[in-house]
Image: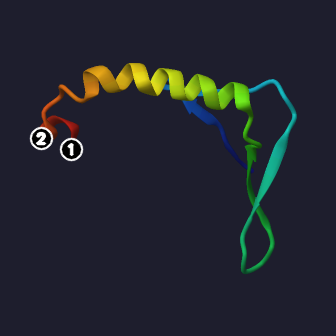
């Protein structure tokens, strides 16, 4: 089964909590993947790193970002 992990600060994060959500195929209701339920701690961490990355990212020319 495909495990969807959080991607924070350029790394896929293996979370220790067991708050996992099944991702269903809407046509068959078959479980096609699992991911973590959102959490305040991980969301705040992702926002913090995104704000830091944005400082240098906005200085990168559009042709390089593409």
Residue 44: give x, y in percent of width and height: 62, 26
Residue 6: give x, y in percent of width and height: 62, 35
Whether tag 2 and tag 1 are in contact, CB under 8 A, the answer is: yes
Mark 1 neighbour class, 10 Å CA radius: few under 14, some 14 to 19, many 20 or more: few
Residue 3: give x, y in percent of width and height: 70, 44
Q: Is residue 62 shown above or below 44? A: below
Per the image, label 1 sits on a secondary structure element best described as loop
Q: Is 52 left or right of 55, judged from the image as shown?
A: right
Q: Is 56 left or right of 49, judged from the image as shown?
A: left
Q: Which mark is residue 22?
A: none
Q: What is the residue that sits farthest to the bottom in this orientation?
A: 27
Residue tagged by mark 1?
Answer: 66
* Depth order, front residue of 2/11: 11
User: Quadrant of residue 65 in the image?
Assistant: top left
Which residue appears at 51% of the width and 21% of the height?
A: 48
Which residue appears at 55% of the width and 33% of the height?
A: 7
Q: What is the residue that sits farthest to the right in this orientation?
A: 18
Q: Is residue 14 visible?
A: no
* Depth order, front residue of 58/14: 58
Which residue appears at 72% of the width and 31% of the height?
A: 40
Q: Is 59 left or right of 48, judged from the image as shown?
A: left
* Depth order, front residue of 34/8: 8
Residue 12: give x, y in percent of width and height: 58, 29
Residue tagged by mark 2?
Answer: 63
Which residue appears at 23% of the width and 29% of the height?
A: 58
Q: Is residue 31 shown above or below 52? A: below
Q: Is residue 48 shown above or below 6? A: above
Q: CA distance from mark 2 to mark 1?
A: 5 Å
Mark 2 neighbour class, 10 Å CA radius: few under 14, some 14 to 19, many 20 or more: few
Q: Is residue 3 visible?
A: yes
User: Quadrant of residue 63 in the image?
Assistant: top left
Per the image, label 2 sits on a secondary structure element best described as helix
């Amino acid at each position: 089964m495909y495990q969807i992990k959080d991607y924070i600060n350029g790394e896929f994060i293996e979370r220790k909590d067991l708050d996992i959500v099944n991702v269903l195929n809407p046509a068959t209701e078959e479980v096609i993947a699992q991911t973590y339920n959102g959490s305040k701690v991980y969301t705040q961490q992702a926002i913090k790193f995104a704000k830091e990355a944005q400082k240098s990212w906005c200085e990168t020319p559009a042709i390089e970002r593409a």
